[in-house]
Image (cartoon, helix red, strand yellow):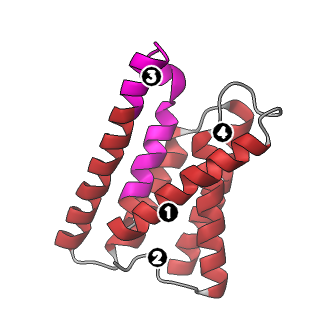
Amino acid sequence: MITALNIVMIVLLIWIFYEDLKNREITTYVMIGLLFIGGFLNFREHIFKIFLISTVINILVISWVVFILWLYAKFELKSSLFRVFGIGDVLFFIFMGVSFPTSTFLVIFSCSLIFSLMISLTFRKKLTKMVPLAGMQALFLGLIVGINLIFELVNLYTF
């Protein structure tokens, strides 16, 4: 069952990548499905108290990142937050925060942002003004979960 949930997660992540790249938006139902699958996979490995503390810490980190982005958008770009950062990106951040313990979340979150930056710089002529951040992060996470599912390199849900 766990393998099946991981495969469904990978399929949904690929769907988000495709959708965000093509339409610059992602379906809310897909994000809700991912949120439940990721939350369940994380929750089954921990007692409720550890799951809750880890999720709260992750959401606080996400809040801090979004706050810094809001400051940058407001004072440097002279724009509103959601003109430079989509609601789908925030939902994807929350999905990642619920799906992994804090140590794994911090590594995957940071690496997915670096991956997105590298891809956007490499393909900057093909990408228009906006980078499909949630899509790029979904591609990265899909690759990580898929490779880990095949080769069982590490347990993504340990501290």
The mark that comes first in sequence, 3 or 1, is 3
**Which span is picked out in magenta?**
69-97
Asked which secondary structure carries label 4, the reply is helix
Q: Nearer the viewer, mark 1 or mark 2?
A: 1
How far apart marks 2 and 3 lie (CA) works out to 33 Å
Element type at marker 3?
helix
Q: Residue type at mark 4: give it.
A: Asp
Frontmost of labels 4 and 3 is 3
Q: Write the residue at 26% across / 64% down.
A: 54
Distance from Cα at disc 2 to Cα at disc 4:
25 Å
Question: Mark 1 or 4, which is nearer the eye?
Answer: 1
Quadrant position of residue 56 = bottom left
Residue located beneath label 3 in the image: 73
Q: Position of residue 59 (x, y in %)?
A: 30, 50
The label on residue 90 is: none
Q: Residue furthest top?
A: 78
Q: Which residue is mark 2?
A: 156
Q: Is residue 111 positioned above or below 120 on the image?
A: below
State the CA–CA distance, disc 1 to disc 2.
10 Å
Residue at image mark 4: 20
Three-letter code, disc 2: Leu
Q: Which circle's residue, 1 or 2, is located before the other in the chain? A: 1
